[in-house]
Image (tube, rainbow, N blue to C red):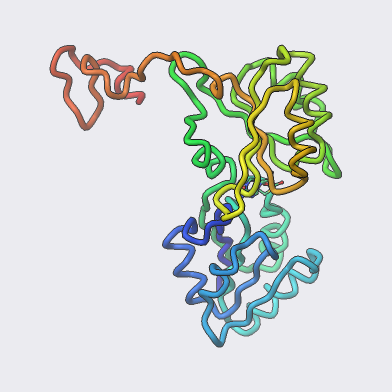
Amino acid sequence: MTVFFIGAGPGDPDLITVKGAKLVETCPVVLYTGSLVPKAVIERARVDALVLNSADMDLDAITQVYLEAKQQGKDVARVQTGDLSIYSSLAEQVRRLDALEIDWQVVPGVSSFQASAAALGQELTLPEQCQTIILSRMSGRTPVPEKENLKSLAQHEATLCLFLSATLIRKVVRELSEVYPLSWPVVVVEKASHPEQRIIRGTLADIADKMHQAKIRSTAMIIVSKVLAIDDFVDSKLYDPSFSHACRQASIAPLSEEAFDE
Ligand code: SAH
């Protein structure tokens, strides 16, 4: 018996992996995290499957579902939004499973920061301009360690993707304005990949008012990055004819180490 933690993706039911979908279709128990998991994903469950919403359950109640499934020898599809590596409470669940000697596995999903970038049609890294993405959040009920405070993260000028922070946008702007000029670009993607997806583009100067006017308070990704406003950048080395990589021999230059990097 195994508990499969499955990333359901950001909202579009087609954005679950084939592996995740097959498990939802075959597991006799399906436990999902409420309304953010697409209905169409849950509807893939077997007609005789026990399908439970964990939105109103605490960790003990969730653990009890796993325990009863183990006693009955039934696999569980534990379906959660986005990908399990980010703000998913995976760690505390598997700690309980390990204590109960229940096997578990993780099936990755498309995270909402990736779906937001796709909605924008935006690469979050650009050659020679930005090669790092920071995934973070403002402190809320869950505090962020002081060493990870937004001002210090902003010093890198990496692309910032902020989860769980839509209601705290004024605080985000206040902290970032101490590091960046007010013209620094910010984009908010609400409900990326859902039919009701919205994109609000702005700068540190006006994004908070724009979000307020649009009444965006949840399920939104805040992306802060200079790459959002750069259209003059060099080509990557990936398709440079003077470089090779493992699958493509250079026609001009000999193999270089950097080519293998790409
Ligand atoms: N594990 C999830 C994140 C869960 S935390 C993932 O990988 O995406 C919940 C936060 O994710 C929300 O507050 C919001 O910031 C973001 N989020 C989830 N779904 C989203 C979507 N469809 N569009 C934009 N942001 C989303």
Near-viewer residue (76 or 197): 197
Quarter-of-image position of residue 247: top left
Tally the numbered discs. Answer: 0
Position of 68 relative to 257 (above/below): below
Quarter that holds the C terminus: top left
Q: Residue at x 58, y 83 (%)?
A: 49
Rendering coords of residue 109 (x, y %): 52, 53
How far from the left and from the top, in percent, is residue 5?
Answer: 58, 61
Q: Residue at x 65, y 67 (%)?
A: 32
Q: Residue furthest left?
A: 251
The image shows residue 202 at horizontal and vertical percentages of 67, 26
Identify the residue shown where x is 47% and y is 36%.
Answer: 121
Q: Nearer the viewer, residue 241 or 187?
A: 187
Which residue is farthest front? 213
Which image quadrant: the N terminus?
A: bottom right
Residue most extreme to the right:
141
Say which quarter of the image contains residue 200. Answer: top right
Q: Residue at x 62, y 56 (%)?
A: 81
Vertical arrangement, residue 119 with respect to residue 19, above or below:
above
Relative to 95, residue 236 above or below: above
Q: Using the rendered view, name the quadrant where residue 235 is placed.
A: top left
Q: Is residue 172 above or below residue 48?
A: above
Q: Position of residue 69 (x, y in %)?
A: 64, 79
Left or right side of 259 for 196: right
